[in-house]
Every structure is written in C-alpha cells, then in structure tokens.
Amino acid sequence: MLFTYKAKSKEGVIVEGILNSFDRFALAAELRGRGYVPISVREKKENIFDRMTKIEDIFARVSVNDQIIFTKNLSGMLRAGLSLARALSVLEKQTKNPALRKILTSLTDDINAGESFSTGLAKFPKVFSKLFISVTRSGEESGNLANALSDIGQNLDKMHSLSRKIHGALIYPGIIMSAMILIGVLMFAFVVPTLASTFRELGVVLPASTRVLIFIGNFFSNHLILAFVIIASSAFGLFSLFSAKFMSKYVHYVVLKLPVIGKISKELNTARTARTVSSLLASGVSIMRAVEIAEDVVQNIYYKKVLKEVRVAIEKGAPFSKVFGEYNNLYPVMMTEMVQVGEETGKLSDMLLEIAVFYENEIENKTKNLSIIIEPILMIVIGAGVGFFAISMISPLYSILGSIK
C-alpha cells in the first residue's frame, strides 16, 4: 500500500514523500528507523495515473538477463572502488528497464538509510531469488560483496543458458505442430466442405471416417470463429490444468519417464542442485540453508521431496550423501559417490561444482541432438495424420470410379 507521510529529521527539517508499506504503523516504524519523527501518515488514494503505473508494472519485468547484467556491472564497479550507493545510483541512470530502475532507486534509498544491501533485495522476492539474497548476505558479512555478486552472475548465466538451450531445442517442433494445426483447420474449413458437396451430388456411400471428417469440416466452415475460440480455450484449459498444483506430481512423473526429455530433466535437476549447494557453501552459507534454497531452485516436485529428506537427515546427523544413495532413480550414482568423497575430504563444494559442470555439459550435448531426435517423430505423426485424411477423402473417389466401370 502507498502512503503519503510528513516527518521531521534530526536537524528539525520537515520532509514529505510517498512510500510503500504494509500499513501505516509499519511505515512509521520504518521512518523512526531512518532517524525521522513521523508527524502524519495517510494512505494515498489511487488516481488514474497510479492505475496506469500499475498496468505498466504488470508488463515491465526484470528478466534473468537484466539480473545478470546488473550483478556483473555492480561487481565491476565495486572492484573499481566505487561505494555501493554510488554504484547503484550509476546503474539506476543507465538502465532502460523501468521496473529495474524503481528497484535500484529503492535499494539506493535503503543503503543511504543505513540498511544492508541484502535486506533491500529481500523486499523484492519476485525478482531476486533466495539464492541471490543468501549469497549477497554472505558476501556482505565476509566483506567480499564484489566476488559474491560475480559468482551470482556466473551462476545465473549458466542456469539461464541451459534453460535457453532446452527451450530453443523445443521451438522447432512447436512451430511445426502449430503450423500443421493451422493448415488442418483451414483444410477443414475450405477443402472438406467442397469435397463433401461433390460426394452428396454423386450420392456416394461414405465410410465412417469420411463422415466424421465431413462433420468436422462443416462445423469449421459454418462456425470458423467459434472453432478458433474452442481450440484456443481448449489449449488454455489444458495449460491451466497441467499447471495446477494438484497435477504437479502426475505431470512431473510423466516428464521423468519420457524417453529423451526424462533424462535431460534428471540431469538438469541434478546440475541445479549441485551448482546451487556448491555456490552457497563456497559463500559460507550453512549446509542446511543451502539445501533449503536448492529445494526452491529445482522445479520437479520429486526432487523437492528428496531435498526435504536430505534436510531431515542432516538434522539427525546423517551424512549428506546418505539420502542421495537411496534415490538413484533420480540422482545418478555419480552424484552420491562424489558427494561422499567431498564429505570425506572436506571439499564438498568443489565436488558439487564438478558434478554441476559435468551434467551441464551433458545437457548441452543432448540439446544439440534433441531436434534431430524429435524430427523423425514429428514426421511420423504428421505422416499418420495426412495419411488418415487422404485415405478418408480419396476412398469415396475410388468408389465413384468403380461404379462408372
């Protein structure tokens, strides 16, 4: 909620402004923490400009790429000797992203008010992950914030690169399938009705498959807009269904069992677990906290469950590798063995980083060949659909030719 406030500084200067807070009592406490004496705090009523700003905020987002550039630039400025507040102010002037500019303004105000950088970042949980905030906090506590930000940038870059390559490999089949659906709709709307009228004039007895195609064709021809609405609604409904929380365990299970995608998914979750925990341990975060954050980073519900069991095992004093050994169907044997070596040698962070690098390279190699693997499958599916359509529509023509003889 937005509030307008009036307060008095230590020097007796009256200041006014607008701040976002949970309620006016929380805002008054925040002002006192900054060294001001609150005089009045009132909720700011929205006007048309505020509503336009909210709409703008919905579409303005801080992408992962923006975060990578932000961390690398900030790290470089800190190493060059600029103060944190000065570096944030420079980035605020340089950035073209309005959402990021607002965040940088807030962070600069927090730093000038005496708050820590990590506390300011924690106010934006939808932008900065727990991993980002935890590594930053560790960097502040150790006095090595520049290196911590550099590590965050490298980790974000690596994770984003992997996700981009996987999505890129799936774009080609997605475009092909979308094009085939569009062509199919147009054929049903314009080609099938023409053939159907010809069959009716000739009085041909039509097989069941042909009658079904003609029925669909007539519907598309007479209600084309409605047909597109039904297709779009069905696609949205399926997407919403598969995105629902109660469907997660079924969708994630199917993904893990798919021939090629399943193996990539396992390697991706293994790499994310290893890189996240390695980065946090290297930054001085406790093993418990590192595993907890890794639980948020992995996307598959079954991997989240394993990491939750890992935390419980660590609390009971069991070794980190014990639980991984019980889930070789999810985490490969190599993960268990290298984690065990890392625990025994005291180099767990280094071993986890090696695991992450190994599986990230494996994913890169597999995604290069993914489109090659998917292409023949697409050809089979498309060929089957075209073949069914051709046989259903051509077989009545053969009947006509046979009757002429």
Image (cartoon, helix red, strand yellow):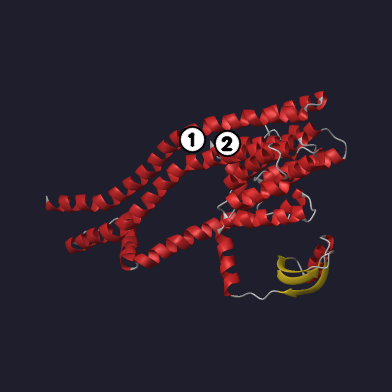
The residue positioned 53% from the left and 36% from the top of the image is 260
Residue 264 marker: 2
The residue positioned 73% from the left and 26% from the top of the image is 338
**Other-residue count near label 2 (Cα within 10 Å), few / some / many at <14 / 14–19 / ≥20:** many
Of 127 and 29, nearer the camera is 29
The reply to whether residue 336 is in sight is no
Of 165 and 141, nearer the camera is 141
Above or below 274: residue 35: below
Tell me residue 334's x, y (percent): 69, 27
- At mark 1, the secondary structure is helix
Q: Amino acid at mark 2?
A: Ile
Tell me residue 333's x, y (percent): 69, 28
For the residues bearing labels 2 and 1, Cβ distance under 8 angstroms = yes
Query: Which part of the image, by quadrant, shows the N terminus?
Result: bottom right
Q: Residue furthest right?
A: 317
Tell me residue 285's x, y (percent): 80, 39
Residue 370 marker: 1
Tell me residue 316's x, y (percent): 88, 39
Of 121 and 368, nearer the camera is 121
| Distance between the alpha carbons at the discs numbered 2 and 1 | 10 Å
**Other-residue count near label 1 (Cα within 10 Å), few / some / many at <14 / 14–19 / ≥20:** some
